[in-house]
């Protein structure tokens, strides 16, 4: 008998090879997929490890710098671990939920609480600004040129500080005052002794004063005169007093001699001791005041103006300020070393034997200083050159 050999067909061999090929392709896909998954897992692990690695950041709180080592990834977690709390008005340079990285710099500015009083109201405010000027600017509060703020704008803001703004308003008004006239008595040689006549009727003057009123938060705080002008000139009352000798009755004389005539002629000649000669002018004076204290003033000084208390215009070389109880207004005087001057003005500080000499230039007035001179009080008429 022969051995039976299985029949191997061509189709059987082809199926075996096809199965092997399919298994190999499937196995390759599985291997590739497994490799990709492994790589992704490795990357996730690396990212996690990197995220959990130590980071160094710089934290600045109100100018104080500190360096921190942390493994946290969010800023909120870092602040929580360091027990750093934030108030609603504090400023943070980064978002509280931002992720931090190695080398980051985070700045925290603490808000200061303070009170601000302005326009009749007091408010409690918070600010992270450094100075009061920055606070006022950021708050949108406007300051007029005359307004005042306490403390000053360059003051550093501190906790619980009280800031006050005072609104300053100025108003200029006019005030009318009366200038009383003086009574001046003058000798009149055309009238006999004992005769009194009103040579000029007196009339009071009118002065307009410009008053500056200063209001602080609506209330009057101060007043000052910034100028003045004479609206109506004062007219002094002048009384003439007779000085002419009353003639004696003529008595007939039988015989006269030249000697008696000469004697009689000499007896009627009046001599006066109150006569002097200064600067080439002979004049009679009423009195002499020695050691008179003299200063100077100028129209360039604030509040002086160009009008005197008597209504005349101030004039260098003529106008002086006097005490009317010592030298009557309108009278002429002679000052040793200066010459003739006329009493036309007064001053609050000019009392007693004091004079104030007027100069146009403020520098000349200041350079005048204080001097002491002899003053001859003459009268309402200026002596003329011989």
Image (cartoon, rainbow, N blue to C red):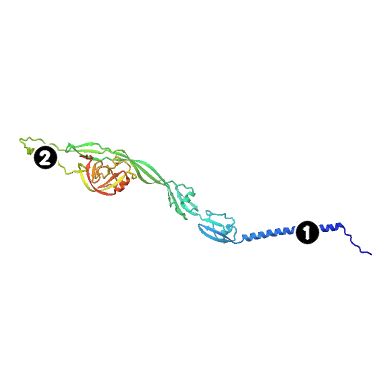
Determine whether, in the image, residue 384 is placed left or right of residue 54: left
Q: Is residue 333 above or below residue 90?
A: above
Q: Is residue 123 visible?
A: no
Counting residues from the start of the chain, the first of labels 2 and 1 encountered is 1
Q: Quadrant of the C terminus?
A: top left
Q: Is residue 370 above or below residue 243?
A: below
Q: Are there few (<14), some (14-19), or many (20+) residues within 10 Å of tag 1?
A: few
Identify the image quadrant of residue 279.
top left
Identify the image quadrant of residue 207.
top left
Residue at the spot x=86%, y=57% of the render?
10
Q: Which residue is mark 2?
A: 266
Q: Which residue is mark 1?
A: 24
x, y percent for residue 190: 18, 36
Q: CA distance from mark 2 to mark 1?
A: 172 Å
Q: Which mark is residue 362?
A: none
Determine whether, in the image, residue 361 is placed left or right of residue 277: right
């Amino acid at each position: 008998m022969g051995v039976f050999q299985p029949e191997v067909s061509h189709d059987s061999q082809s199926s075996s090879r096809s199965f092997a090929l399919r298994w190999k392709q499937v196995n390759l896909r599985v291997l590739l997929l497994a490799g990709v998954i492994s790589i992704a897992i490795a990357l996730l692990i690396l990212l996690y490890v990197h995220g959990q690695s130590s980071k160094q950041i710089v934290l600045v709180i109100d100018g104080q710098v500190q360096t921190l080592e942390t493994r946290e990834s969010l800023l909120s977690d870092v602040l929580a671990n360091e027990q750093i709390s934030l108030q609603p008005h504090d400023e943070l340079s980064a978002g509280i939920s931002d992720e931090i990285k190695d080398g980051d710099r985070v700045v925290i500015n603490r808000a200061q609480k303070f009170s601000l009083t302005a326009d009749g109201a007091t408010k409690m405010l918070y600010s992270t600004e450094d100075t009061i000027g920055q606070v006022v600017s950021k708050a949108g509060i406007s300051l007029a040129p005359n307004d005042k703020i306490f403390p000053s704008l360059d003051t550093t803001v501190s906790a619980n500080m009280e800031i006050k703004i005072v609104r300053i308003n100025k108003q200029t008004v006019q005030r009318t005052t009366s200038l009383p006239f003086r009574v001046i008595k003058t000798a009149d040689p055309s009238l006999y002794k004992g005769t009194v006549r009103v040579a000029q009727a007196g009339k009071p003057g009118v002065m307009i004063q410009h008053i500056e009123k200063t209001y602080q938060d609506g209330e009057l705080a101060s007043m000052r005169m910034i100028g003045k002008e004479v609206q109506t000139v004062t007219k002094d009352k002048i009384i003439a007093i007779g000085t002419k000798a009353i003639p004696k009755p003529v008595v007939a004389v039988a015989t006269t001699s030249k000697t008696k005539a000469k004697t009689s002629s000499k007896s009627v000649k009046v001599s006066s001791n109150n006569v002097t000669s200064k600067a080439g002018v002979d004049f009679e004076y009423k009195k002499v005041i020695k050691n008179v204290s003299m200063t100077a003033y100028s129209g360039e000084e604030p509040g002086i103006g160009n009008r005197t208390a008597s209504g005349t215009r101030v004039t260098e070389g003529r106008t002086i300020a006097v005490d009317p109880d010592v030298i009557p207004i309108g009278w002429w005087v002679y000052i040793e070393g200066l010459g003739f001057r006329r009493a036309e003005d007064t001053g609050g500080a000019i009392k007693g034997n004091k004079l104030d000499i007027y100069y146009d230039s403020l520098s000349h007035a200041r350079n005048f200083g204080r001097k002491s001179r002899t003053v001859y009080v003459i009268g309402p008429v200026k002596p003329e050159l011989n």
